[in-house]
Amino acid sequence: MTCDEAQELITALVDHEALDPERSSLEAHLKECARCRFALEEERVLKQAIRGAGQGIRAPSELRDRILSDPRIFPGKSRPVARWQDYVWPIPHLARPAVAVALLLAIALPTFVLLKSKSEPIAIAALETYDLFLRGELPVRGTENSNEIVEQLTRAVGGHFHPMGYDLTAMDLRPVAGLVREIDGRKILVAIYQGKGGTIFCYTFLGSEADAPPNAARFFDASKKMNFYAFSSGGVNAVLHREGEVICILASEMPMEELLALAQSKAKPS
Ligand SMILES: [Zn+2]
């Protein structure tokens, strides 16, 4: 058996589809030929990788449709749903792993990115407003009247819940603006405080403690019997706590210990 003939049969052997007498002569050839043994090993590893990667990964149906209906990949309208094999097989054996890996990436990467952006905790997504505000890119209607901000924000969510409406004048911080952000279909009230003491954002929205990022550090306040979750994103510190169905996040560039102490002092056990 020549190497070329062996290469033809290696896939069948890996798939347990090789039959005698080809199977026996292939095995005899493999004993003699290191190059084909390597090719066999490569094929096995690849098959395993594809099987492993395939479990748990499912390309979004829209992406699958796009790939399957792309004429550059599957030319000809007579075979709109070509099998993968039809595409991979005509390619010379040695190029196959590369093509398969490229295809895997084409499916797996967008899936991963989609999942990632979708599962980004709402708390992290909310913090983006902090950065936008400091860069002056957030369209906010400023006001110095904290009651007005609370009223505006409450009206924006049809009175279903209220912003925390903290008084932070003791820290030399005054309310300067309020706005409503919608993330993943949930309305988030944002009250912005500024002054000599720096900047503090107070986010309020309906949610649960599961809205804390998974990597947040949890602190239990024994006297209030409440959990506080501390996390940072892009240089902004944040502390999340729950009052009933309402989640509150305080965000600031001030040190985490101070922010945590502030959140603990303002939090009301529900
Ligand atoms: Zn060989």
Image (cartoon, rainbow, N blue to C red):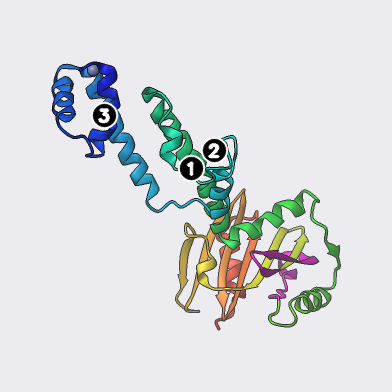
List the single residue furthest toward the front: 78
> Are the residues tagged 3 and 2 within 8 Å (C-beta)?
no
Q: Residue at x 36, y 41 (%)?
A: 50
The residue carrying mark 1 has its beta carbon less than 8 Å from ligand 1: no
Give the quadrant of residue 152.
bottom right
Amino acid carrying mark 2 in the image? Phe
Circle 2 residue: 74
Residue range (magenta): 163-188
Q: Determine whether the residue tagged by mark 2 lies in a helix, strand or loop.
A: loop
Q: How many marks?
A: 3
Mark 3: secondary structure? helix
Q: Is residue 25 left or right of residue 39?
A: left
Q: Residues within 10 Å of mark 2 (few under 14, many from 20)?
A: some
Distance between the Cα atoms at labels 3 and 2? 26 Å
Give the residue type that dot 1 points to. Answer: Ala
Mark 3: few, some, or many residues within 10 Å (few <14, many ≥20)?
Answer: many
**Residue 173 among those drawn in magenta:** yes
Q: Nearer the viewer, mark 3 or mark 1?
A: 1
43 falls in the magenta region: no
Q: Quadrant of ligand 1?
A: top left
Q: Earlier in the sequence, mark 3 or mark 2?
A: 3
Q: Position of residue 60 (x, y in %)?
A: 53, 53
Which residue is drawn at the image coordinates 74% and 52% (left, top)? 132
Q: Which residue is mark 3?
A: 10
